[in-house]
Structure formats: C-alpha cells, structure tokens
Image: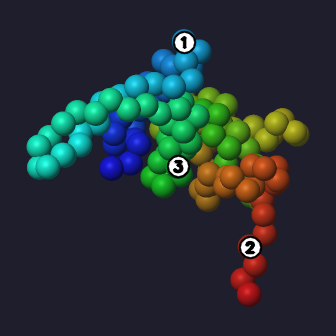
C-alpha cells in the first residue's frame, strides 16, 4: 500500500499535507492497518510532509491531474499553473515572458524532476 492509500486517498492526503503546512508541522502521524500473525492491528506511524507532497505530485503525474503550482511542459517550454477556473480552463504562465494561456492546451504534460531542475525541456535521445 502506497503512502497516498495509507493516508486515505488523494484528497485526504492533500488535506493533511495542507493542514500540516498551514500549522508549520513537518511530520504527521497516521494509522495504518497491519496484520500480525493473521490478526489486524493499527500501527501509528508518521510521514514527512515533503514526502507526502512528493507522493501527491507523483499521483498527479500518473493520473494526468493538474493543480495550481504544477509545472507543465507545453510547446517545448515550461509553464506554471497559476489559477484553475474550470476543469478544462486554467491560467498558465511561463514566468519569463509573462505569456498567459487561458485553456488547458492539448499536449501539456507535467514537467519531470530533471526538467524542473534544468529549467527547460530536455531532449530525448532515441539511440
């Protein structure tokens, strides 16, 4: 069972991370089910908020979900989602030239960790 599932699903994990950040907490506790000798037991464990946020981003990447603050690739450029006002419409800007697009354009995808670090789209070698 992954961290998102252990926290009760995407929305609950997101809410727990947001609440922790709002209260300047870096680690949260949660109960997870464990079977010991065939008997169910609840074990209290913890996760760092940074790990939860990373798991949430990976979930969004895997399920093609976009949220405010996500960095995306579009037309070989990196953009940030600034505002979502409809499931199919959002304000995205590249931050450098101030270009704004008001619809989720076709062909967008989440930027990879490597692209975020480089600040640009990375070429793929097909060799």
Which one is earlier in the sequence, the residue at label 1 or at label 2?
A: 1
Q: Secondary structure at mark 3?
A: helix
The x, y position of residue 106, in whole percent, is: 59, 56
The image shows residue 75, relative to residue 91, as above or below, that is: below
Q: Comparing marks 3 and 1, which lies closer to the viewer?
A: 1
The x, y position of residue 80, in whole percent, is: 70, 39
Q: Nearer the viewer, residue 41 or 74?
A: 41
Q: Which mark is residue 8?
A: none
Query: Visible in this render: residue 60?
Result: no
Q: Dot 1 corresponds to which residue?
A: 23
Q: Residue at x 47, y 33 (%)?
A: 47
Q: Nearer the viewer, residue 92 or 13?
A: 13
Q: Dot 3 corresponds to which residue?
A: 58
Classify 10 Å Cα crowding around label 1: few (below 14), some (14-19), many (20 and above).
Answer: few
Q: CA distance from mark 3 to mark 2?
A: 21 Å
Q: CA distance from mark 1 to mark 2?
A: 41 Å
Q: Nearer the viewer, residue 69 or 107?
A: 69
The image shows residue 9, relative to residue 114, as above or below, that is: above
Marks 3,1: beta carbons within 8 A: no
Which one is earlier in the sequence, the residue at label 3 or at label 1?
A: 1
Q: Dot 2 corresponds to which residue?
A: 124
Q: CA distance from mark 3 to mark 1?
A: 24 Å
Q: Secondary structure at mark 1?
A: loop
Classify 10 Å Cα crowding around label 3: few (below 14), some (14-19), many (20 and above).
Answer: some
């Amino acid at each position: 069972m992954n961290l998102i599932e252990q926290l009760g699903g995407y929305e609950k994990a997101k809410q727990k991370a947001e609440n922790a950040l709002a209260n300047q907490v870096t680690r949260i506790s949660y109960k997870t089910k464990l079977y010991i000798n065939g008997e169910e037991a609840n074990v209290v464990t913890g996760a760092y908020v940074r790990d939860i946020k990373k798991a949430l981003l990976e979930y969004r990447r895997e399920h093609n979900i976009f949220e405010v603050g996500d960095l995306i690739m579009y037309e070989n450029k990196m953009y940030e989602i600034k505002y979502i006002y409809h499931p199919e419409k959002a304000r995205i800007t590249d931050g450098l030239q101030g270009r704004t697009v008001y619809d989720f354009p076709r062909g967008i995808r989440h930027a990879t960790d490597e692209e975020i670090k480089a600040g640009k789209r990375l070429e793929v070698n097909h060799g």
